[in-house]
Image (cartoon, helix red, strand yellow):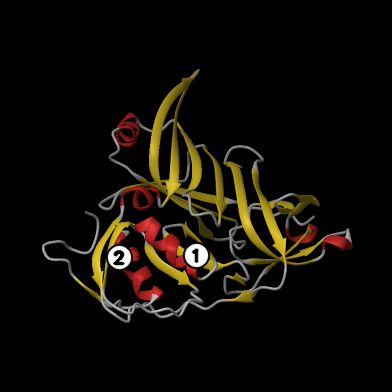
């Protein structure tokens, strides 16, 4: 197996005004991404931060984490809101651990309150929900539904519920991936070239059949995306073929050999989607209330 040498990492902790970059301390991480709507969870641990920076995290002065990893170049692996920080001591080491959720703030807090005009489409509805998610960017949304509203309608409620209705209308999964909203039908995959996964490119052990799909272990690689395609090339030809990545678990320790991904992939025929032009929406403001979190 060809080893991927020279691994690099950078952890950015901060808020909208400032950030702290860490690339020389020990960092461990355990991250899971899936196409499920619930925020992708991540647990990140940092060893021996300064007391000031630990206090900033414990007091929620820093509320966002971004972890980038790679070999020759850094790529974003995970972004999440810091939900629960805690600190402990192990002999001479001060260790701060924080639980994160990708899009957790918008998933729990964002509210929509606006009026849709007659003729509004699901794309318009989605645009309003995304507008209310102040920490989430609009991403790929492949909507099969062509329905339009026959008359005006007040749109009010949790943004996540609004997105969920739109996704179900198109038979799609929705999730927040690294701060970006993704609405992806089960028979579609993200655009771009699928990564060829073999022993030469980082596959570890043999693929295994599970109730959720084919499980494949490999060296950590940010080119493999949840919702994207991979081409499996195994010594056991039975497993060879094109698959869609439906979940990925990333485990790493910058000061040990742990630097792995565990993928769940599903076979089938998948059409790649293209990023559509954003809808401007067909809305009116509710009297006295802005478009956003209320």
Q: Which mark, by number, is residue 227? A: none
Q: Tell me the residue that label 1 is attached to.
A: 168
Image quarter hosting the C terminus? bottom left
Q: Tell me the residue that label 2 is attached to.
A: 131
Horizontal placement of 74 versus 71: left or right? Answer: left
Q: Total label count?
A: 2
Image quarter hosting the N terminus? bottom right
Whether residue 134 is visible, yes or no, is: no
Which of marks 1 and 2 precedes in the sequence? 2
Q: Residue furthest front?
A: 150
Q: Which residue is drawn at 34% across and 74% down?
A: 124
Rate crowding at label 2 as few (under 14), some (14 to 19) or many (20 or more) other CA atoms within 10 Å.
Answer: many
Q: Which residue is drawn at 30% across and 78% down?
A: 280
How far across and down, in percent of the image, does residue 48 sit? Answer: 44, 30
Q: Up-down: is 99 above or below 156?
A: above
Whether residue 29 is visible, yes or no, is: yes
């Amino acid at each position: 197996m060809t080893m991927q040498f020279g691994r690099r990492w950078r952890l950015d902790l901060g808020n909208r005004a400032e950030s702290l970059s860490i690339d020389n301390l020990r960092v461990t991480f355990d991250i899971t991404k899936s196409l499920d709507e619930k925020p992708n969870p991540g647990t990140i641990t940092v060893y021996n931060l300064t007391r000031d920076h630990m206090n900033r995290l414990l007091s929620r002065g820093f509320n966002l984490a971004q972890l980038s990893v790679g070999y020759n170049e850094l790529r974003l692996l995970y972004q999440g809101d810091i939900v629960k920080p805690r600190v402990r001591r192990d002999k001479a080491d001060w260790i701060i651990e924080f639980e994160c959720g990708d899009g957790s703030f918008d998933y729990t807090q964002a509210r929509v309150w606006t009026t849709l005009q007659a003729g509004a489409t699901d794309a318009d509805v989605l645009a309003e929900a995304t507008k209310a998610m102040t920490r989430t960017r609009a991403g790929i949304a492949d909507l099969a539904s062509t329905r339009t509203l026959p008359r005006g309608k007040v749109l009010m409620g949790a943004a996540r519920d609004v997105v969920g209705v739109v996704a179900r209308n198109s038979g799609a999964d929705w999730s927040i991936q690294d701060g970006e909203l993704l609405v992806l039908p089960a028979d579609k995959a993200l655009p771009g070239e699928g990564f060829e996964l073999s022993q030469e490119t980082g596959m570890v052990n043999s693929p295994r059949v599970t109730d959720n799909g084919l499980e494949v272990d490999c060296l950590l690689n940010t080119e493999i995306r949840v919702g994207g395609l991979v081409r499996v090339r195994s010594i056991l030809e039975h497993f060879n073929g094109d698959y869609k990545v439906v979940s990925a678990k990333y485990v790493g320790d910058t000061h040990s050999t742990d630097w792995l991904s565990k993928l769940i992939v599903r076979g089938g025929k998948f059409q790649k989607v293209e990023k559509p032009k954003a809808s401007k929406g067909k809305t009116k403001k509710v009297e006295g209330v802005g478009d956003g979190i209320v």
